[in-house]
């Protein structure tokens, strides 16, 4: 049976990227050697890193005063790298769920954290707005897309202090104004690469703010200065990252990817709103285009496990909601074909006919 993958991560890939990855396991870029055994300190692998950086730069219109680097450890490692490098007095955090809570906890090890706004009062079902940003903060930290609760910042915030954003689950899903951010980073496994590589885009003046004496691997400047080769980088994930970036470019760039993402998200939210058995728990203005959460409509809660079983029988994979938010979540990342969303919509319609 055909499977429709809606897992929140690691995410799915276009077939062409998988084919390139499979080929490179036997023959990396025509070298006759496997990418799995290739040395990172070679012109061939350095070319992969350079191309990945320049594709990032081109696809997101990254200004010249920014550096891009790749590192291991996942987004979770950046939760403490960021305050270790940049928090000396106070930092502002916006609490929008699990990933910011974890980041806040780590930041408290290095300085004072002011939670400027939180959406915890309504179960993280919205993005706080209109909060004051004090001018004396070392930085303001946000999670641009909340993978678990399905909320997303739809605009690039104006911040008087350096703005740092976790874009693990929405990187390259829409055009962004990079100049509004001091740092953008994320685990690449949601939208770009296999697990194992973290991407970061950082404004160069941030590198001059690092005062703390840090272990070599924790100092962000070392990763930039050593061109992501401070130690053995995650070679295979970076290779696949390059293939994903090439794929995005070949599709027509981030504008086209964004158009497709909006089309998929609108199709699914429209069905959730129309279908008498389901509802969307997130405020309409803040609904994520990547992680689409839905629950059973009021009075229909007892059908939850039946729908899950039905959806699985129709080939849907990974639509059970996170244990903290319940219900369902369909993650529709960049590489998710429209066909998958059409199949889920058809499945919801069929279920409605059975249980209306
Ligand atoms: C998955 C996720 C993380 C954690 O990423 P790891 O790479 O597993 O550490 C952090 N932030 C967001 C928004 C995520 O979706």
Image (cartoon, grey):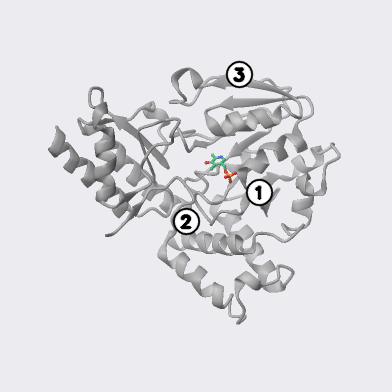
- Labels 3 and 2: the sequence-earlier one: 3
Tell me which residue sits at (33%, 33%) in the image. Answer: 294
Measure how far apart labels 3 and 2 are at the Cα level.
35 Å
Position of 347 compared to 223: left or right? Answer: left
Residue 96 appears at what percent x and percent y? 52, 28
Measure how far apart labels 1 and 3 are at the Cα level.
33 Å
Position of 337 compared to 298: left or right? Answer: right
Ligand 1 is within 8 Å of the C-beta of the residue at disc 1: yes
Residue 335 seen anywhere in this rendered image of the structure? yes
Measure how far apart labels 2 and 1 are at the Cα level.
28 Å
Q: Which mark lies nearer to you, 2 or 1?
A: 1
- Labels 1 and 3: the sequence-earlier one: 1
Residue 343 appears at what percent x and percent y? 26, 50
Position of 29 compared to 283: left or right? Answer: right
Residue 139 seen anywhere in this rendered image of the structure? no
On the image, which quarter does residue 36 sit in?
A: bottom right
Counting other residues with Cα less than 10 Å from the Cα at mark 1, is it few (<14), some (14-19), or many (20 or more)? few
For ligand 1, the image quadrant comes to top right
Q: Which mark lies nearer to you, 1 or 3?
A: 1
On the image, which quarter does residue 95 sit in?
A: top right
Residue occupied by mark 1: 73
Instruction: Choose between 263 and 293: the one closer to the eye.
Output: 293
Tell me which residue sits at (48%, 38%) in the image. Answer: 147
Residue occupied by mark 2: 253
SS state under label 1 = loop
Residue occupied by mark 3: 132
SS state under label 2 = helix
* Pointers 1 and 3 in contact (C-beta within 8 Å): no
């Amino acid at each position: 049976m055909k499977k429709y993958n809606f897992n929140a991560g690691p995410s799915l890939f276009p077939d062409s990227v998988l084919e390139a990855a499979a080929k490179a396991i036997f023959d990396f870029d025509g070298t006759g050697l496997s990418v799995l055994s290739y040395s990172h300190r070679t012109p061939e692998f350095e070319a992969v890193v350079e191309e990945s950086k320049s594709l990032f730069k081109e696809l997101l219109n990254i200004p010249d005063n920014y550096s891009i680097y790749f590192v291991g450890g996942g987004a979770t490692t950046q939760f403490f790298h960021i305050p270790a490098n940049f928090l000396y007095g106070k930092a502002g955090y916006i609490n929008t769920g699990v990933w910011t809570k974890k980041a806040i906890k780590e930041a408290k090890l290095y300085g004072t954290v002011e939670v400027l706004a939180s959406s915890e009062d309504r179960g993280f079902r919205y993005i706080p707005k209109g909060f004051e940003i004090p001018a004396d903060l070392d930085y303001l930290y946000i999670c641009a897309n909340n993978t678990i609760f399905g909320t997303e910042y739809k605009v690039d915030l104006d911040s008087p202090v350096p703005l740092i954003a976790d874009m693990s689950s929405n990187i390259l899903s829409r055009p962004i104004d990079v100049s509004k951010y001091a740092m953008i980073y994320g685990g690449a496994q949601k939208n770009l690469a296999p697990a194992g590589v973290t991407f970061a885009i950082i404004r160069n003046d941030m590198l001059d703010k690092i005062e703390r004496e840090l272990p070599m691997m924790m100092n962000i400047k070392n990763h930039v200065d050593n061109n992501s080769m401070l130690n053995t980088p995650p070679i295979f994930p970076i290779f696949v990252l390059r293939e994903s970036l090439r794929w995005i470019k070949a599709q027509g760039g981030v504008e086209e990817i964004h158009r497709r993402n909006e089309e998929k998200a609108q199709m699914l939210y429209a069905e959730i709103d129309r279908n008498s058995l389901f509802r969307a728990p997130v405020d309409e203005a803040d609904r994520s285009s990547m992680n689409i959460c839905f629950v059973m409509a009021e009075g229909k809660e007892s059908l939850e496990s039946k729908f899950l079983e039905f959806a699985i029988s129709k080939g849907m994979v990974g639509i059970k909601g996170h244990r903290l938010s319940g219900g369902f979540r369909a993650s529709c990342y960049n590489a998710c074909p429209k066909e998958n969303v059409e199949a889920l919509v058809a499945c919801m319609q069929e279920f409605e006919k059975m249980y209306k």
